[in-house]
Image (spheres, grey):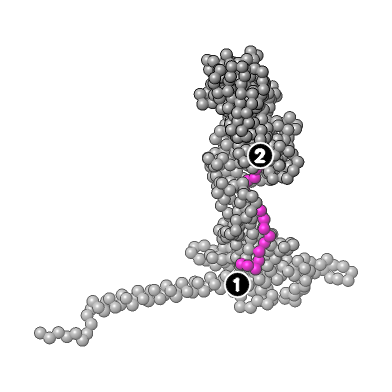
Amino acid sequence: MKKNNAGITLVSLVITIIVLIILASISVYSGISTIRSAKLTKFTTELKVMQQKVNELYDSYANNKTVMVNGIEYVGKGQVATETELEKRGIQEIGKMPESIFDAGKLDEIFSSEGSGITDKTGYRYYDIETIQALGLENMEYEFFVNVEKRSIISVQGFKEDGKIYYTLNQVPNGVYNVEYNKIDGNLSFEITSEVKNGQGKIHIMNIRYDQYVNKWQVRYRLKVDGGEEENSWYTTEEFTGNEFIIDVPIENLLKDYEIQVIHGDEIVSEVKVAHVLQVGDYINYDPTNGGAITTTYTSPQGTYHSDQAAAIADTNQNMTEGNGYANQTFSVSANTNGWRVLGIDKNTDEILLISADIVQTIDNSNFYLRGQTGYEWGIKELNDICEIYGKGNGASGARSVDADDINNITGYNPKTAQCYDGEIHEYGNEVTYIKNASNISYQDTLNNKSGTYGNSSTIFRYYDKQNDIWKSLTTGESKQLESTIYYYYPNTLTTSESGEEVGILTDSVEHEMLFSRTSDGQDYWLASLCTYTGSGSVYFGLRNVYIGNVGNDNYLFNSYGGTYSTNYGVRPVVSLKSNINIIRKAGTAEEPHEIQ
């Protein structure tokens, strides 16, 4: 049977109609979207045109020029009447008072955080279409609130998009960042603040001011690396939050300097400003007492000593019942009120380190004594245990004593490469072998190939065996190799002389003031680091210190032929702040330290 294919079926007709409906809806949607886009473009364009006109008005306002509007003469900031001149209005008075036209509800809707983001109505005037046309602007549909002095404009009608009403250029999606006019030398200015938030450093660039309207700012920055040199490449950020740019700073760079510029293309470039999140020496408002709630004390405990120690001690006056080898000594957090300053960053934990601004002393206001073999063996533990009581305040994870590495990290001193006591038997790193003979003790060093007879008439040779944690005495035929670890230096020259080229920290630097400048006023302090002096007449065992402006050694706690000595210095705790700490940067002075939150 022959089929008839000349017509269309009902099904195909329905499908065709559906397709046409879909295409029509797409076309309508596209048309609506195009119209909305065109309206947004017009709104944005009028904002820009009005902004440019207000920029011109500001120039006349600031430079005492004349503007005619609707037959009225406006001059600069206004002119007081004189015998020869009439009173004239200032350019900031162009327009009408908003309160005379709009009710309070309408103004509160626009001048609010939820509206324009501008809450202060002071100085704003209402520019209606008539006023706008009188300024020479034709075909404008929108009206504005204008503050000439602040160079600020706000749309009266606003533009509604996705349920939100936009009133200013700042608010328009993918819009522009307007800045307040401030005519100063250099034309372009900005401010920098910084903070630590959850262990992350942040540098804020804000209050960008320029003498012309600019569509979009950028911030570029680069890190100053060790040695003061800059990284070759600049990094650029366009992250604009509210009214500021933000640069995220990793923990390892918190104390380093950043060079920062505000730019607009290649044409407008600000001066370079140097910023950092924290600086060595900055004051922090750390309170080890937690507002008086903590009154921890520490008293030197009775030591636990080796069985042969009594036989090795020649000085019977040494106190063996205390860990310091001297006497009972008590410290109390509540008895010591100190400021706290940034010392550095712990490379192992990424925690911020603080050091007490002054030394801490006993409850009797005395320095801490160490004496003899006991003081040498237990000195570091004693110092750290004393300082631990200062590490229980808000934001702290613990505390210890300052040590030589802390100081050397700041000054740049490296004992392995420094030239201290070159050619001497006690040169740093020299390994010296001492041999007990029948009638004397001889020595030989490996670094300078020196040898000789022990200069002391005594044939006694005592030393601390670190490997076995015990004091020993050489017997005839025995030998012992000891390494010299003594050094001292001035922080500015990194040598044993205070005068010379300043290759370390400058004497007028914050670092020098914090660590060295006050030691001449009785602020000398222990460093929790051992040192050994290998001499041709004796070997001395002691702890390092900061003394009268230099890093030194107190090597007179005990010597190899039995001499016992006592010495006292202040104690300086180092507090570690938790990695999630928040520090808000302030002036950084003793009167107004940075805030821990």
Picture residue at 73% right of the left edge, 29% below the top? 522
The mark closer to the camera, 1 or 2, is: 2
- Residue 200: x and y in percent read 55, 47
Q: Is residue 538 above or below residue 489?
A: above
Instruction: Tell me the quarter of the picture where residue 151 sits.
Output: bottom right
Instruction: Tally the numbered discs.
Output: 2
Determine the residue positioned at 49% across, 71% down.
36
Numbered tag placed on residue 46 in the rendering: 1
Q: Amino acid at mark 1?
A: Glu
Q: Which residues are magenta?
A: 265-281
Looking at the picture, tell me which residue is in the foreground, 361 or 150.
361
Position of residue 418 relative to residue 49, above or below, is: above
Above or below — where is 516 with respect to 195? above
Q: Is residue 155 left or right of residue 90?
A: left
Question: What is the crowding at mark 2: few (fewer than 14 residues within 10 Å), some, or many (at least 20)?
Answer: some
Q: Nearer the viewer, residue 527 or 68?
A: 527
Q: Name the residue beneath numbered marker 2.
A: 419
Q: Residues within 10 Å of mark 1 (few under 14, many from 20)?
A: some
Task: Give how far across and how far down residue 426 sits, in percent.
Answer: 64, 31
